[in-house]
Image (tube, coloured by chain):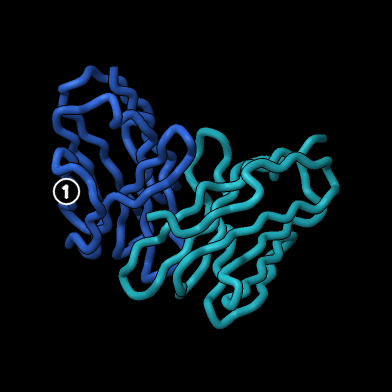
Amino acid sequence: SQQGEEDPQALSIQEGENATMNCSYKTSINNLQWYRQNSGRGLVHLILIRSNEREKHSGRLRVTLDTSKKSSSLLITASRAADTASYFCATDSSGNTPLVFGKGTRLSVIA
Amino acid sequence: DTAVSQTPKYLVTQMGNDKSIKCEQNLGHDTMYWYKQDSKKFLKIMFSYNNKELIINETVPNRFSPKSPDKAHLNLHINSLELGDSAVYFCASSQDQNEQFFGPGTRLTVL
């Protein structure tokens, strides 16, 4: 069953602007991960945040996690045309439970 | 060096045929996965193998049979292909419950 729901479904911004994508999930999680998928390619892991963490940074990426609201956000600062892709959140509950992906946010960065 | 590779990249076949997709990872990971991504980009886990043993089998028709000859390979065999099997199939690998590394995908079209 689907766990994560990204919001918005699609986002179009100008180069240099910040992009914020949100993910909500339904049940308790162990980890939450964000992935990027360029058109016609496989998914690439961006960042993993554990359930006991609230914020994580990686380069121009900032991820927050609010377990009380069962939500996470991915912020991409100073966006570039190369950031154009679909972004997915994925959660796992514990142990050997599978990653459950949301439907993704399609980000378009216009040069 | 390609970390997770899949062959073929494209597969076009008639309904009723049997086909296989191969996956290999050179990362030394213990766990491998097969995902199906439909036309709406929804990514769903199909199978997961850990050290050649099946650990996750989601509700997938038994026409789909994964085979893991060793922990670096996880092949997917599909019998009696149906129109609804048309999708992009991704192989992935991981160590423990950390980030997953995805292959480039196999686009299957059933006519």
Indicate the position of residue B36 as horizontal and vertical percent values.
36, 42
Q: Is B71 drawn above or below residue B37 in the view shown?
A: below
Tell me: A80 left or right of B76.
right
Indicate the position of residue A71 as horizontal and vertical percent values.
60, 67
Residue that mark 1 sits on: B67
Q: Is B20 drawn above or below residue A18 in the view shown?
A: above
Q: Which residue is nearer to you in this view: A1 or A48?
A: A1
Q: Tell me the residue at 45%/43% (across/down).
A: B42
Tell me: B1 left or right of B55.
right
Q: Which chain is blue?
A: B
Q: Tell me the residue at 66%/72% (across/down).
A: A56
Q: Which chain is cyan?
A: A
* Quarter of image, res A54: bottom right
| SS state under label 1 | strand
Label 1 marks which chain's residue? B
Q: Is B73 drawn above or below residue B56 in the view shown?
A: above
Q: Tell me the residue at 62%/74% (across/down).
A: A66
Q: Tell me the residue at 72%/63% (across/down).
A: A59
Amino acid type at circle 1 is Lys
* Quarter of image, res A97: bottom left
